[in-house]
Amino acid sequence: MTPKSTPENPTKDEPWMYCLSRGRARAEKMPPFGYAGPLRPYPIMTPRNPLHLRDLPPNVPVTDYHEDAEPTSEIESKQQQMTVQYKPGQIDVLRKCCQVARGALDATIRAARPGVTTEELDKICHAYITAHGGYPSPLNYYNFPKSCCTSVNEVICHGIPDARPLQSGDILNVDVTAYIYGYHGDLNETVLIGECDDESKHLCMTAYKCLQRGIETVKPGARYRDIGEEVTKLATQRKCSVVKSYCGHGIGTLFHCAPNIPHYAKNKAVGSMKEGHVFTIEPMINAGDWRDETWPDGWTAVTRDGKRSAQYEHTMVVTSDGVEILTRRNEDSPRVFPWTDGESEGVVPGS
């Protein structure tokens, strides 16, 4: 039997090291940095295979960036300038893709509790998606080293799963994207770990409400820039701030494409929604100031003041009379926070 590699007892085939240079390098010691909050990076498991990535079953269709980390089809696509109107048959396939992504997030969230590492959660997410014949979209996307993003406490987004055990009082965001049937489906949720303080609960509820407020604006003819106006209005009323560096995005046959969807007010997003447009809304809400900075790993975005951040995300399609949430929670989704029960029961925002 192959011995299990742990940070305390690493194996030769799976050493644990700190991530650097957006996933292109590793280090044995934690890199120096002016960390604003209490969280610190931990080593990540680094397989000794040619790509230093988790193994994939042979039947899984890989992305064009799986080996060289460059999403060439995405970079060169006309979809960076124009928003695709997907046809009903294509949306049917995308809906199935998003159901796999939802299942992966639910399975991962169920395992989140004090003492569990985010590396272990990443393993669960990877196993779920590949078992269903899919590819975890983040894996090797511009050298991202893991199969999902796990963002704890003051991490805004793009946190790398590592060896740190979750602690009671943490908040954890898990961001999952699955590539299957030729499409990507993207969603994320923030959950409470153990017993959390009221400020963290308020922040999570605010982030969830901001997502719902953004979704309420979606219908044919609505302007993309108006999403940010509504999200910011609500976040400000609840004494929180909206991150400006990261946005929602078009998705479908590509992981990221047009339209670009800022979540902050007075943005300059172009275009109006049309039936068949598919995109994400994913406002990142901070308890303190909206400004961010990035850790030496080149991926982990954190609040500049060290205060906490929360986020929720859905992939959705514009319908003839409104919106369909393709990644919505369902009756089997874990009831990890009470304010999502309406969605799990099929209630659409604004109805």
Image (cartoon, rainbow, N blue to C red):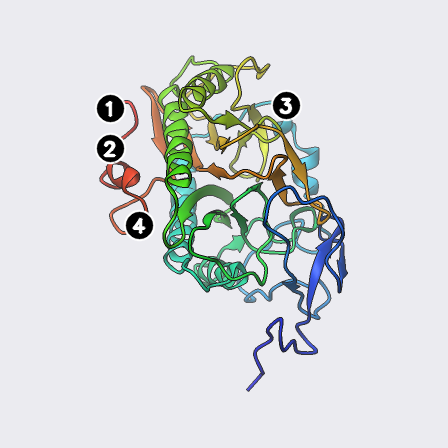
Residue 135: in sight, yes or no?
Answer: yes
Question: Left or right: 191 with respect to 11?
Answer: left
In 3D space, how far apart are the residues under numbered discs 4 and 1 (Cα atoms)? 21 Å
Tag 2: amino acid: Val
Looking at the image, which residue is at 62% across and 40% down? 301
Q: In terms of sequence position, does the residue under pointer 2 or pointer 4 come before the other? A: 4
Disc 2 + disc 1, Cβ < 8 Å: yes
Tag 3: amino acid: Gln
- Which structural element holds mark 2? loop
Disc 2 + disc 4, Cβ < 8 Å: no
Q: Which mark is residue 347?
A: 2
- Which structural element holds mark 3? loop
Q: Within the image, what quadrant is residue 202 found in?
A: top left
Looking at the image, which residue is at 55% across and 42% down? 154
Residue at the spot of label 1: 351
Question: How many numbered marks, from 0 up?
Answer: 4
